[in-house]
Amino acid sequence: MLEITKEQNDRTISETILIEEKRIAVCAKCNKKWNVSIYRQIPKSGYICPSCMEKKRNKVIKTALKWVCITIAGLVLFDKASEAAYIERGYKAYGGEYILLLFPVWFWFIESVVNDTKHDLKAERNFKND
Ligand SMILES: [Zn+2]
């Protein structure tokens, strides 16, 4: 037990000394130069700096939260529409309110069309300026 601890201590000391040996890596996202350990494995797709990695992580969290909210909105709208349809009809039936369960799909479709249109307009504007 004592030997393992000694070995771990030795390894920690040797790693600390080797940390001084750094190399420069250019972030594939922001193009900034970063000092990285010579032992750091850099993927073929390129080095991503801690700052860009955090931005990417935050973006994933935001996207997940957005879709959870959209799904909940679809369920709430469906619930309200079912109540209104029941009051209107006076009996339980399956009607158009069920299309609200596809609210996230509609949202995704409309968002894609809007983003594509924005992208096309931007590309067209850049083409005219050149
Ligand atoms: Zn970066």
Image (cartoon, rainbow, N blue to C red):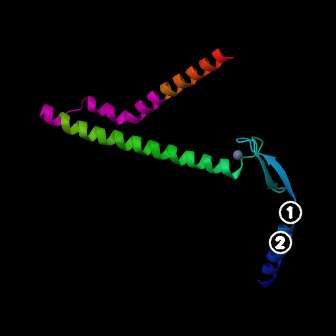
Horizontal side of 85 relative to 36 (left or right) equals: left
Residue 77 among those drawn in magenta: no
Part of the protein shown in magenta: 86-111
Numbered label attached to residue 11: 2
- Residue extending farthest to the bottom is 2
Residue 36, quarter of the rendered image:
bottom right
Earlier in the chain: of badge 2 and badge 1, it is 2
Q: Can residue 41 be seen in this view?
A: no
Confirm or deny contact between disc 2 and disc 1 (CB under 8 A): no
Residue 27, quarter of the rendered image:
top right
Q: Give the image location of residue 29, x and y in percent.
A: 70, 41
Of the 4 image quadrants, the one containing the C terminus is: top right
Asked if disc 2 is less than 8 Å from ligand 1, the answer is no
Nearer to the camera, 92 or 23: 23
In the depicted structure, whether residue 119 falls above or below residue 5: above
Of the 4 image quadrants, the one containing the N terminus is: bottom right
In the depicted structure, whether residue 124 falls above or below residue 30: above
Element type at mark 1: loop
- Residue extending farthest to the left is 90
Q: Mark 1: which amino acid?
A: Glu
Q: Which residue corresponds to the image point at 60% horizontal and 17% vertical from the top-left?
A: 124
Cα gap from disc 2 to disc 1, whole angstroms: 15 Å
Q: Is residue 8 visible?
A: yes
Residue that badge 1 annotates: 20
Q: Give the image location of residue 72, x and y in percent.
A: 36, 44
Q: Main secondary structure of the magenta part?
A: helix
In the depicted structure, whether residue 100 falls above or below residue 76: above
In the depicted structure, whether residue 94 falls above or below residue 4: above
